[in-house]
Amino acid sequence: MEPLSREFLLSQGKCCGSGCTNCPYIKCSRCEEMFACDIEIGKDKCWCMNYEVIELSEYNTCMCPTCMDKESKLIIK
């Protein structure tokens, strides 16, 4: 059986939690929710580049949009 494509999995809108080989979603380092990183799915720039991080405390890796809102401020680019 062929693994599901990244494009198909992304079109589902969220991670199913089955550990798919081509899953385009990553786990938030703060809340552990799964979310899509735009760079991981082939875009030139990720949505998180619109944020200026004030302080990440113990969270120093990718965060979901909700947690990024809590830890930083949105800057207009």
Image (tube, grey):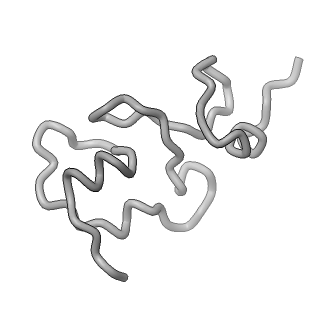
Q: Is residue 69 above or below residue 34?
A: below
On-image quarter of the C terminus: bottom left
Q: State which quadrant residue 51 falls in.
A: bottom left
Q: Quadrant of the N terminus?
A: top right
Q: Position of residue 43 (x, y in %)?
A: 59, 62
Q: Write the residue at 66% across / 23% down.
A: 20
Left or right, 6 with reference to 31: right
Q: Position of residue 42 (x, y in %)?
A: 63, 57
Residue in the picture at 64% in, 42% down? 13
31 lies left or right of 33: left
- Image coordinates of residue 4 in percent, x first then y, are 79, 30
Depth check: give the residue in front, 58 or 14.
14
Percent coordinates x, y for residue 2 in the rendering: 86, 24
Q: Quadrant of residue 44?
A: bottom right
Picture layout, residue 1 above or below residue 53? above
> With 1 as the anchor, is 37 left or right in this view?
left
Residue found farthest to the bottom: 77
Q: Residue at x 75, y 45 (%)?
A: 7
